[in-house]
Amino acid sequence: MPRAKRTTKQRKVTKLETPPKKVSATSVTFHKSEPVSVALYIFIIGLVIAFILAIVATANVGQALTGSHWTNSLWVWLVMFVFGILIGLVMIQKEKLTNFLITAIAFVFFTTVLSARNGVMSIDVLIPYVGTFLMFLLRYLTVIVGTSGLVIAIKEIIKFFYK
């Protein structure tokens, strides 16, 4: 049996058109986005731990306020301190350091102001235990953010003098 000739119409590509590119699974490019920093993951883990600790401390508010609860133990504060140091050490994006330092200073300042004279705990009058939870959460987050800001500031001071 003789084979029938297949005719294919090939389209000429003009100068204005570009030929279609073959795209494989490995050559697909997405929109350029900034790489997610390890510091972000460390902060999120610290935030989750602080959230859980604040819930536990709020549930045992009598002991937590007197300092006899395990949420006020040295190892809890040491873990928060280590998370802050790690965030400060792995934060390497130069263009974001100044913004982070300003934000850290503002966060520490405002949490200090809100904690003075039970400012946050006055929310408990309206909604029970919400102010107490916020007080404990801000207490733990202040250690993380303050320590990371201190480490970044020390790194920048050292870079300033060695340039």
Image (cartoon, helix red, strand yellow):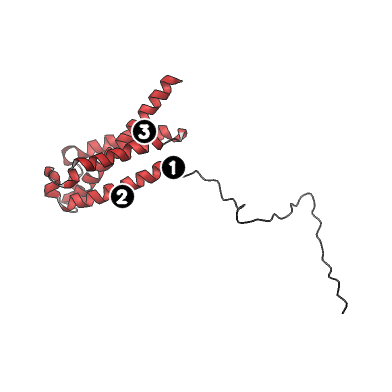
Q: Which mark is residue 48?
A: 2
* Furthest-right residue in this view: 2
Q: Amino acid at mark 3?
A: Ile
- Closer mark to the observer between disc 1 and disc 3: 1
Q: Which mark is residue 101?
A: none
Place of residue 68 in the rendered image (x, y in percent of width and height, measured from the top left): 12, 45
Q: Is residue 36 left or right of residue 12?
A: left
Quadrant of the image for the N terminus? Answer: bottom right
Q: Earlier in the sequence, mark 2 or mark 3?
A: 2
Q: Secondary structure at mark 3?
A: helix
Place of residue 157 in the rendered image (x, y in percent of width and height, measured from the top left): 38, 24
Q: Residue at x 37, y 31 (%)?
A: 152
Residue 25, relative to residue 3: is it above or below? above
Q: Amino acid at mark 2?
A: Val
Name the residue tied to disc 1: 37
Q: Quadrant of residue 19?
A: bottom right
User: How many numbered marks appear?
Assistant: 3
Name the residue tied to disc 3: 102
Query: In this orientation, which residue lies closer to the viewer: 25 or 142?
Result: 25
Query: In this orientation, which residue lies closer to the viewer: 89 or 61?
Result: 89
Q: Earlier in the sequence, mark 1 or mark 3?
A: 1
Observer able to see residue 6: yes
Give the Cα separation between the discs numbered 1 and 3.
19 Å
Q: Secondary structure at mark 2?
A: helix
Place of residue 8 in the rendered image (x, y in percent of width and height, measured from the top left): 82, 66
* Furthest-front residue in this view: 1
Q: Residue at x 38, y 28 (%)?
A: 155
Packing grade of label 2 (10 A; few <14, some 14-19, many >=20) is few
Q: Secondary structure at mark 1?
A: loop
